């Protein structure tokens, strides 16, 4: 059971640094009503009728926290370019602190374009378009990142590390920066450090780890395995506080620091779902739980609860609100009985 009054107080008091791979999500809407046949081509020309910009990658995690009512500082690397300008504008619009977003002349801001065709008033998602231009992170930038981390450590309760990019040492997370994070986690043991990493979960130690089952298995095994092997594979990791592995409709697999394995059930959703961004919202729930002094099991359950809210948004990655959280807790009989009054 959850105490919603304490939960709200904890969320409002929570101060977070979301350190990670930020990108700009662009939703391109092309309404077929405005298709044209021009004289210089035999192809139909699509009309771009609307563009919606959203913070993506680590920006989506930041947005999830803010929508629930938490305080967020953003730390990331972006280019000194148009998409970088637009990304900063998006982040400012959701009321996060962007003072520690580093803009680099030589870097290109990572973008994800999601084209959507509108035919007979129905949205049809086309293939995503991603930028893949990465430059090695310089020693000077590494020093700047490490100084930022040291400067803000006393201003926040949680370091949330969001690794989205595949190329090692070409973003904010380099081997040297990871070692600095591990060092800070050892010094500031009262703080919460959690990493959500696609490919480098095995490069961290003595902090909370989180990823999805496909990423976890691919990182730790050359063989195509299923989630029943997660516990066995976790023995190849260095020491960790707890490992949270999201498994889609099967919920979450939790490996606690002592090796205890738990299956945390998903929250059933009786409608069509969009799982893009579900992992981000699961991370948010886990962090709120850990900050609220819940054990790893209850924190994982809160992660599944918040993920069940965001997957209902079919048009975007979605985000939770405190009101939707309370509604979901009530619908699943997870609120203390006296709080129904």
Image (cartoon, helix red, strand yellow):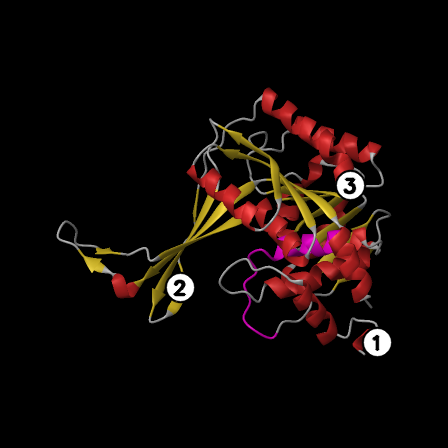
Dot placed on the residue nearer the N-terminal end, 1 or 3: 3
Percent coordinates x, y for residue 49 in the rendering: 33, 58
Kindly identify which residue carries mark 3: 207
Q: For the point 47% across and 39% down, which residue is it? A: 85
Dot placed on the residue nearer the N-terminal end, 3 or 2: 2
Percent coordinates x, y for residue 281 in the rendering: 65, 56
Q: CA distance from mark 2 to mark 1?
A: 43 Å
| Label 2 residue SS | strand
Q: Camera-side residue: 285 or 16? A: 16
Front tag of 2 and 1 = 1
Percent coordinates x, y for residue 236 in the rendering: 75, 40
Q: Camera-side residue: 231 or 285? A: 285
Question: Which label was assigned to residue 109?
Answer: none
Q: For the point 72% across and 30% down, which residue is it? A: 151
Residue 17 horizontal side relative to residue 130, left or right? right
Kindly identify which residue carries mark 2: 124
Bounds of the magenta segment: 270-287
Kindly identify which residue carries mark 1: 337
- The answer to whether residue 224 is visible is no
């Amino acid at each position: 059971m959850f105490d919603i009054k304490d939960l709200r107080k904890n969320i409002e008091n929570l101060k977070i640094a979301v350190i990670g791979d930020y990108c700009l999500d662009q939703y391109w809407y092309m309404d077929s009503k405005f298709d044209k046949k021009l004289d210089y081509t035999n192809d139909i020309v699509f009309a771009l009728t609307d563009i919606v910009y959203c913070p993506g990658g680590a920006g989506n995690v930041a947005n999830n926290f803010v929508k629930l009512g938490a305080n967020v500082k953003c730390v990331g690397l972006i280019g000194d370019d148009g998409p970088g300008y637009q990304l900063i504008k998006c982040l400012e619009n959701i009321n996060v602190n962007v003072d520690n977003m580093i803009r680099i002349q030589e870097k290109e801001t990572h973008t994800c374009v999601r084209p959507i065709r509108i035919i007979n008033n129905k949205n049809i998602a086309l293939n995503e378009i991603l930028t893949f231009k990465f430059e090695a992170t310089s020693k000077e930038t590494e020093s700047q990142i490490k100084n930022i981390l040291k400067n803000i450590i006393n201003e926040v309760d949680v370091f949330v590390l969001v690794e989205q990019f595949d190329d090692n040492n070409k973003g904010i997370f380099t081997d040297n920066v990871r070692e600095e994070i591990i060092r800070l986690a050892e010094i500031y043991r009262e703080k919460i450090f959690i990493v959500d990493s696609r490919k480098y979960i095995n490069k961290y130690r003595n902090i909370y780890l989180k990823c999805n089952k496909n990423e976890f298995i691919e990182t730790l095994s050359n063989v195509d395995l299923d989630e029943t092997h997660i516990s066995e594979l976790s023995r190849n990791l260095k020491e960790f506080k707890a490992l949270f592995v999201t498994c889609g409709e099967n919920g979450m697999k939790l490996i606690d620091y002592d090796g205890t394995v738990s299956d945390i059930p998903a929250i059933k959703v009786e409608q069509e779902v969009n799982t893009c961004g579900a992992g981000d919202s699961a991370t948010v729930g886990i962090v709120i739980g850990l900050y609220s002094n819940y054990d790893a099991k209850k924190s994982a359950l809160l992660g599944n609860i918040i993920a069940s809210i965001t997957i209902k948004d079919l048009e975007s990655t979605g985000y939770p609100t405190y009101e939707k959280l309370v509604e979901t807790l009530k619908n699943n009989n997870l609120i203390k009985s006296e709080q129904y009054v």
